[in-house]
Image (cartoon, rainbow, N blue to C red):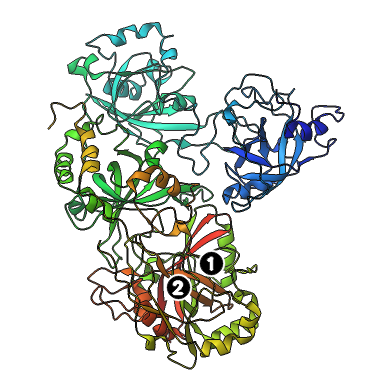
Amino acid sequence: MAAAGCVFHRTLTRSRSRSRSGPNQESSSSPAVCRDFLSVVDLQRYSRDQGSSVYFPQAVLSGDDLYDITLTDGDCRLQVTLDPGLNRLVERNVLRPGSTLRNATFAPAMSAQHPACPRASAQTDSYRLESVEVRGDDEDDGVRRFDVDVDSLPWFGSSDAAGPLVPLRASRSVFLPQWNNVDYSGEVWREAPPTEEEAEHGDDDEEEEEGQRPAVTVSELRDSFLSGHRSVARGAVQHRLILRIINKSHLMYYGRTDRNCECPYKAVLEVCDRTGGVCVVLWNSVCVNWYRCLKPGDVISLRRYRVKQHYQAELDDIEISVNSRNPAAQISVLPESSVSPEYLPPAPIYSFYNSKELLDRPHSAVCDVIGLLTFTGRAERMRSKDGRGAELLEYRWLQLEDGTSDQPINVKLFSTSQPETHHNLHPLSVVVCTRLKLIKSANQTHNCCFLTNTVNTQVYCTGLGHHSEMSYRKVRPVRQFLQWLRSQDDGQVLSRALIGGFYVYPPPPVSLETYMKDRRGEPGFLRGAELQRELERLCYRERRTFCIQATVTMVTYSRRGEEDRSLFWTDRAASCSSSSSSPRLLTSSSHPSPSLSSSSSLLPLPSTPHSFRPPLSTSPSSLSPTSPSSAFSQMASRPVDLRAARSCKRKLLLQPETPTKRHPSVTLQPEQNNNTVILFEASMEFLENSNADEDESDDDDASSFVTAPLFPAFPPIAEETLPMRYDHASREEQAVVVAMGGRADPGRFDPAFDDYYTLRLRALSDSVSVHVVFLPHSSPPDLPHPNTWTSILSHGAFSSHGPPPSPADLTVLASQLTNQRLVCVLEACHLGGTRTELILSRAFQLPN
């Protein structure tokens, strides 16, 4: 029981002490407002069911999700339900574990009736969080810190021993992961086989003996079912099967709001014995008890199951249904040595292809790959295209090297129900991905292909003991890769290893005609106001591509951390026109207005994680304006007088001050020790339990800085946008940063580059202004172009066939964009809170 002086006791006992005349007293008790600071311990998501609406009589349940939130005041814990009207705070990652809350309004609610929840009975008070203020990360003054062991705190209003939490407002026995529907969530998902249940089966004693044999084979089951044998077609089969798991699907969640099912999960195992293969479907709580315990290659014993017609196959095929009741299935994992050799199922067959061989494989071919991980993208999400458009699918990009070609293996890896493995995917790991599908596009300018998931995709990486357990370590392509790996140097790999940041692949086409052909059937161009509405609908780390027609009215070159010293060009005529029609779009970022450009940080980045830092020009003459309709200046770190800026901006833009020379600072990656310790340890894992198996820094050119006490003062680029140089000593911290829910501390890790361009686009449709970031990278050698602004924007890159223009020269050349009508391809990703990243990946000139 919580101490009498705790915040919850003081606040909630007022509501609890009011008279009650029945079990549903929500209307007779007024909400209680807690003025003290509270901390969010945990957020747990689940899908509602048929009875969930009873708990929210005045709320509109527009989505499928409900959230239970665990709070602490430092003295005790309280589990409440989030009012569905506040779900958007979670979906935008504003309200999250670790958040500090104030002015929380708790409404008494009908007590949850779920019998499995020890703290949600009819005799226990239940609350709903109706409104709350979430304090920002930078609001530290007066915040109470809870430096306590939260798990040791008592639960408010309960003296019972703590049991596992279950959903309060739906008859579900497990929670969903917060950001996808594929992974498992919570400690109830068993990592080891349920040996206590096996002990109840007295007929399993022979499982420890050698020379075990099955009582029936797959082919016999199939023949009996298809011939209508009553004992197989209509009843539970007791006969023992001995099977090898060949493939394992990800978890499939089938919970629906119009149906009640406590554990709506299923998973499919493709298994075989010496007579043939069959699908085994694990249902409901069997998934909770066995999904994590079983892996491809395991030999299992199976009893008490049902044989059914395969729901996706032809009429002459079957599947085996395994459930926790009617009948309760009996599963065991067998050592291979315990099975009689003539009945031992065959081992899985792998189809490994290296990066060179993948180019010759057909589209949609299923492949296995192994490689050294050199780039790990941040976790992002996209809308499902399978008819359930509300579901968000989590994915990340990987690049693997295997030494067979200059091109890495690109993998768009979605969740595979292996959250622990995905959290450990950091550079310099040896990664094996099985059952991937090859994607090729005939319309791509570049010869691009990438791999992505099938339902049976599995991922294995060093550091988790996977490689020493799997039979693929004996395959010849794997051994050839290990020979190449041992010849690599840690320092050389570290110099090109990146993690996180914006990434797009395959690269968009370089011509408007090809781009429009590729996006045939997709929505057309957006107006500026429509783009704003779409950006506001994005959920956390949701990635979408938009197209608008616009002109460029300002170009700014900046270096991260030095945004107060920036080169910029502006179309004076467009700026004056925009200022007169929409003055809010030109206000300084230090005084943001509720406009598209300030309501969220619209910050883009390079199309690939390739590092490029162009040299700064040393020519003072390059700072002069090039046309009467344009102006070029550079901002210095001087206090900005906004009133003077507004009244004199035209004069100042046309009369830049005398340039002063300055050497910009360039952060270089420290040279790594020339050894192969990390890679050696990575390859050693393949040898365990298998005794019989066989930069160069950039130049700091001087650049002139012109004092101009006025904007543009664009918001600085987001830390999550820039790929980080991999730091092996801080790999766990970096992995957390790029995972869902992770945030980067400013300056904590070295970015791969620190300079970028910001463009202000004005939509042709309604003159709404948008700030986007553009960072050109080195283009492939087969795509030369003249390095004009038009060609750079259409290629998304400088030409590699000649020296790129300096930032100063390129900023002056921005006058070429005056009055140019462009089709702009924008990549948007919501980064949490009010921050939305908006990246210009391509801009194509419209014909006049």
- Counting other residues with Cα less than 10 Å from the Cα at mark 2, is it few (<14), some (14-19), or many (20 or more)? many
Could you say whether the residue bearing mark 1 is in a helix, strand or loop? loop
Asked if one can make out residue 525 in the rendered structure from this viewpoint, the answer is: no
| Position in image of residue 176 (x %, y %) | 53, 37
Within 10 Å of disc 1 (Cα), the crowding (few <14, some 14-19, many 20+) is: some
Q: Position of residue 775 (x, y in %)?
A: 39, 69
Considering the image in quadrants, where does the N terminus appear?
top right
Q: Classify residue 699 as left or right of residue 817.
A: left
The residue positioned 22% from the left and 41% from the top of the image is 677
- Which residue bears the numbered disc 1? 715
Give the amino acid type for the residue marked by disc 2 in the picture.
Answer: Cys
Rendered view: 314 above or below 273: below
Residue 757 seen in render: yes
Query: Mark 2 near mark 1, Cβ–Cβ under 8 Å?
Result: no
Q: Secondary structure at mark 2?
A: strand
Image coordinates of residue 582 in percent, x first then y, are 64, 78
Could you tell whether 412 is left or right of 366 in the image? right
> Is the C terminus in the top left, top right, bottom left or bottom right quadrant?
bottom left
